[in-house]
Amino acid sequence: MTPSASPKSEKLNFATKLAFGAGDMGTAITANLLVWFFLIFLTNVAGLGAGLAGSVVMVGKVWDAINDPMVGMLSDRTRSRWGRRLPWMVLGAIPLGISFFLMWVVPPLDKWALFSYYVVLALLFHIFYTVVNLPYAAMTPELTQDYDERTSLNSFRFAFSLGGALLSLILAQVIFAQLPGPEAQQYLVLGGICAVLAVLPVFVCVWGVRDRALAFETRRRAKTPTATMPFREQLRVAFRNRPFLYVIGIYLFSWLSVQLTAAIIPFFIATWMNLPSTAMAQVALTVQGTALIMLFPWSALSRRVGKKTVYYIGMILWIGVQAGLFFVQPDQVALLYFLAVLAGFGVSTAYLIPWSMIPDVVDLDELNTGERREGVFYSFMVLLQKIGLALGIFLVGQALGWAGYIESTAGQPAPVQPDSALLAIRLAIGPLPTLFLICGLVLAYFYPITREVHAEILLKLSERRRLAGEEAE
């Protein structure tokens, strides 16, 4: 084998990519509704103060800091006739739907009991979210080792993810517009429908990828030992992987910008732009619809110019959008929608590129340690996604509380917000996400795994496995 040779990589067929993509649809539906509506639901429907509402999700992240890496490590060590990942997805799907539905119930409790109720439900939901979504994401490098095929696989994943997000917003708009009655009833119906839709795609994914996933598991058991390091040692090794640190930094800053903007935009539209509640879903649809459309062009461009260059282009566009949102005035509705379209270009790369980088990091880790720990690496990606969500909602809630935001009272007209609250909303949608995006752009510049570097990693792994096979014989 010559140094320029590349290891042979089997391409994935369309049906496998389609089934794998479906696996992210259900969790995307739940996560998207929480991003866009949960904070305003807690303040304007359940009646919690902005500070307490922002704390509900943040409290759950303290547990997630332990929950995500533990599930990742345990899924790496799982041995069953269904492999390492699929049993977790099957067992977690229905509890995920039930806990999500209960988050939209408003029980007749006093303020602190209500706060405790939502904290407990948030903890339960995020446990089951991890049990389903983390093993699912960790299958990515197991289905293909091809550098570009992984980007293609992730484009299918996030097409379903964004498709699910769009579906949840369309359902929200239809229910809010057509269903008479109090807002609490509208959210309850929305939560119930989306809870069912969150469960079904998980089983579609498991059924569609099972043969490919189990074939990989058979080969892995024959050639690569299961990770046996103690948990603390696994974390230490993972965080000594320099490309991994760059990827999680890129992802955290990108995703924090997404979640911060999504959490504040309902307040921006309602209190600054003075638009009706239906406009909130329309703006979200514009952003995520554009992001969905752009996934496949970005994937194709990545094959020509590389992942880093695609990320640069998307981030530069997105930085201009976030900075511009601070200056949008209430009568500039057309400009708002134009910026929403441009934002979709950048949001699309935030979904696609970091998740396409992490499988290459897993291969580098195997080269360095001789073990495969997809679950450990992906656990931190899922954890960062949820940290981004939690920090976004927490920062918005705290900032609004400090700025004197006045929560609504059921059955009463919306209160007039003070200038300090309006300024806080504009700062949270403009300068703050812009700063995070710039940080992610700087980290992407130093990310070292190019297509050529990854080909060399696979070549060395292939040679090591060949020699190990000869020794075994």
Image (cartoon, rainbow, N blue to C red):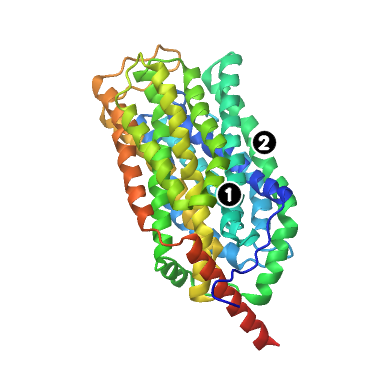
**Which quadrant holds residue 178?**
top right
Tell me if residue 228 comes above or below residue 261 in the rendering: below
Instruction: Locate residue 231, reporting x and y percent.
Output: 48, 69
Please report whichever mark, 1 or 2, sits nearer to the chain's N-terminal start.
1
- The answer to whether any part of residue 80 appears in the image is no
Q: Is residue 230 left or right of residue 245?
A: right
Residue type at numbered disc 1: Asn
Q: Secondary structure at mark 2?
A: helix
Q: Which residue is mark 1?
A: 154
Question: Of residues 387 and 329, which is closer to you in this image?
Answer: 329
Tell me if residue 25 comes above or below residue 304 in the rendering: above
Q: Which residue is mark 2?
A: 196
Residue type at numbered disc 2: Val
**Which quadrant holds residue 140?**
bottom right
- Which of the image's four quarters has the C terminus? bottom right
Question: Of residues 126 and 333, which is closer to you in this image?
Answer: 333
- Separation of marks 1 and 2 at Cα, in angstroms: 24 Å
- Which of the image's four quarters has the N terminus? bottom right
Tell me if residue 370 comes above or below residue 271 in the rendering: below
Q: Residue at x 55, y 71 (%)?
A: 4
